[in-house]
Amino acid sequence: MNCRTTLDSRQGDYLLGSSDAEHQRLIRQAIRLAPVTESFFREAGIGPGQHVLDLGSGVGDVAMLVARLVGPSGEVVAIERDARSISRARGRTAEAGLHNVEFVESDIAHFSRDTRFDAAVGRYILQFLPDPVATLRSLSEKVRPGGIIAFQEGSFAPFVALSAHLPLWSAVVSLHHEVAVRVGVNTEMGPALHKVFQDAGLPEPSMRLVMELGHDPDFTQWLSDVTMSIRPKIESLNLPLDKVGNFDTLHQRLHEEVATSKTVVPWLALVGAWCRTRANSISVLNDSCRLTGDSDLILVTEGLPTIQ
Ligand SMILES: C[S@@+](CC[C@H](N)C(=O)[O-])C[C@H]1O[C@@H](n2cnc3c(N)ncnc32)[C@H](O)[C@@H]1O
């Protein structure tokens, strides 16, 4: 029997839901991941003045980070299909005094714009989509030639492997993995980005893997937080919970296990992949054409043979 269900475009099927607790979890997670995501976007070339599209913006953390990188002369358009998340994201952006972010309530599959972006980015989103290759292919048409595509996605394999020394932590991580696989999340979307980019007609991406490690209560809360967000799915799938025990005491027990072990535990590995979309034909035909970091096409005429 195939236990996987297919992800479709209804938010009700989204694994993590959209409760206030899930919003708070996303915000706490974003604080931890901000330095990693910021340095990844800088390396990919995100910078002042650019117009950037953010996919699956949640409560707005990636969009706000990018808004600061592109500055007041740049702009971020952030796509999110969940109305509650959008409303929270708008409120937070206004509170932060950022005026260069537009949140659009839409499924990614239905979003369209006439203008082209300098870059498209996302974090923890392609893994939830039914056809990430088609998403990236369509995205590459929304980004100008020579523009940036940069995504950070998860990888469970090192997360599971480096959790094995602690029975409770490991049991909870395995439960997450099981639930994610059962509902159709690609738990190895991060490493798969190399192929997914190329299947979408994009150049081979540059890639990085970063794994957070920790032991303090704030760090271990990460796992109990996600467990609470996916609890409805765990219960609807009727998965055995004997190794995990009572959800109400889970955070305390996870923290005690980690603290007494004097070891660190990992969080889901974050794999970043980025590339520049192919330059348009004039720059391919002539080595003397180059694209600058912004959107201008510069034709360098020095050294070209004179046409008689
Ligand atoms: C794990 S959260 C990540 C949020 C944000 N990128 C971050 O890293 O903080 C994924 C978000 O994508 C949204 N999402 C999932 N599938 C979507 C789709 N097909 N179209 C638009 N948004 C989607 C969910 O509602 C959720 O808010």
Image: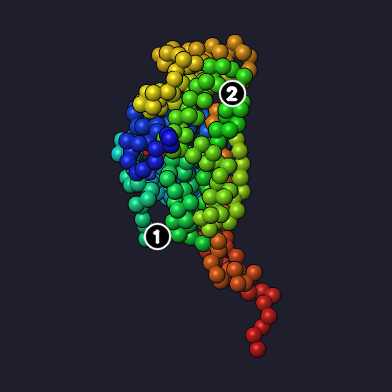
Q: Position of residue 211 (x, y in %)?
A: 59, 32
| Front residue of 164 and 88 | 164
Does residue 85 lie above or below 77 as drawn?
Answer: above
Q: Position of residue 108 (x, y in %)?
A: 38, 48
Residue 2 in view in this figure: yes
Q: Quadrant of the N terminus?
A: top left
- The residue depicted at 39 percent of the width and 41 percent of the height is 6
Q: Is mark 1 within 8 Å of ligand 1?
A: no
- The residue depicted at 33 percent of the width and 47 percent of the height is 106
- The residue depicted at 62 percent of the width and 19 percent of the height is 165
Q: Nearer the viewer, mark 2 or mark 1?
A: 2
Ligand 1's image quarter is top left
Which residue position holds label 2?
163
How has the structure been colored for display?
A: rainbow
- The residue depicted at 56 percent of the width and 16 percent of the height is 167
Which residue position holds label 1?
115
Residue 216 in view in this figure: no
* Secondary element at image label 2: loop
Is disc 2 surrounded by few (<14), some (14 to 19) or many (20+) residues within 10 Å?
many
Q: Is mark 2 within 8 Å of ligand 1?
A: no
Q: Position of residue 307 (x, y in %)?
A: 64, 85
Disc 2 marks which amino acid? Ser
